[in-house]
Structure formats: C-alpha cells, structure tokens
Image (tube, grey):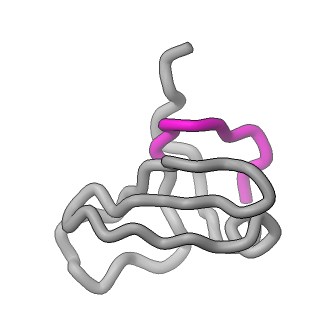
Amino acid sequence: MIENYKLNDIVQMKKDHPCKKSHYWKIIRTGADIKIKCLGCEAVIMMERHEFERKCKKLIEAADE
C-alpha cells in the first residue's frame, strides 16, 4: 500500500490487468475517487480512494513536478 501518490504517478497494483500487456498503471485523476489507466491497453478504471489504497502494491515512478 502506498500513501504518497499524485497525478501522473506510475503504480503497480496487486493484481495484473487481464490484457497482460503491462503491469503498470498511470494515475490520471485524484480526489475522492482515483482514476487509473493501464499502460498496455489504455483501459481506464475508476475506484474509490480507500479501495485504490488497499489494491495498490507500490509506486514505480513518481511524476515530475
């Protein structure tokens, strides 16, 4: 679980996306809900913040400020 994340960070979730092209996701919206985009097939998933924090494994690359 990661706690310090922001827009455009690259993260790894505990379960891979079924497309099997990429293990990594890009955060494209933050707030009460978090929206992430698969870097393999570009599918977009939106989930509640507490669900994202529970399912996120680690921060791969922090976004440039």
* Along the viewing direction, whichever of 54 and 41 lies nearer the viewer: 41
* Along the viewing direction, whichever of 2 and 32 lies nearer the viewer: 32
Residue sitting at x 48%, y 72%: 45
Residue sitting at x 29%, y 85%: 18
Residue 11: in magenta span: no
- Indicate the position of residue 23 as horizontal and vertical percent values: 34, 64
Position of 23 compared to 8: left or right?
left
Q: Magenta region's main secondary structure?
A: loop
From the image, which quarter does the N terminus lie in? Answer: bottom right
- Indicate the position of residue 44 as horizontal and vertical percent values: 40, 68
Position of 6 compared to 50: left or right?
left
Residue 8: in magenta span: yes
Quarter of the image for residue 51 reads bottom right
Start-end of magenta stretch: 1-10
Considering only vertical position in the picture, is 47 above or below 31?
below
* Along the viewing direction, whichever of 60 and 28 lies nearer the viewer: 28
